[in-house]
Image: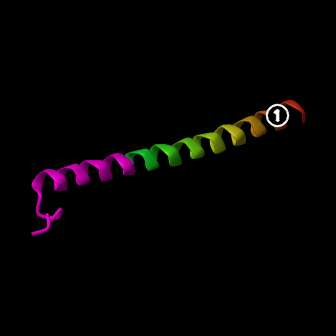
Amino acid sequence: MEYDNNNDPFRREFNKRETKKRTLKSWIFLGFIFMIFLVAEFVRYIMSIIYR
C-alpha cells in the first residue's frame, strides 16, 4: 500500500504554510521592484527641478 500525501493532515498544513510563505516572498519582491521604480522617478523629478 503506497502512502498518500494528500490525506496527511500535517503535510497539508505544511504545504499551506509553504504556499503562504511563497506568496509573501513574491509580494515583498514585487514591492521592492516598485520601490526602486518610485525612487528612480523621484530622483529624476528632483534632477529636472535642479537643472532646469
Of helix, strand and loop, which mostly describes the magenta segment? helix
Identify whether 6 is placed above or below 19: below
Q: For the point 51% across and 45% down, which residue is it?
A: 29
The x and y percentages for residue 26 are 45, 49
Q: Position of residue 33 (x, y in %)?
A: 59, 45
Is residue 44 found left or right of 37 in the rendered image?
right
Question: Image point 18% across, 53% down: which residue?
Answer: 11
Amino acid type at image mark 1: Met
Residue at left 55%, top 41%?
32
Q: Which residue is mark 1?
A: 47
Vertical placement of 3 versus 41: above or below?
Answer: below
Q: Which residues are magenta?
A: 1-23
Residue 3 position in % (x across, y down): 14, 63
For the residue pair 2 and 17, the one nearer the viewer reads as 2
Magenta stretch encompasses residue 20: yes
Q: Residue at x 63, y 40 (%)?
A: 36
Count all numbered tags in the image, as a single digit: 1
Residue at the limit of the structure toward the top, as seen here: 50
Compared to residue 26, the image places residue 45 above or below, namely: above
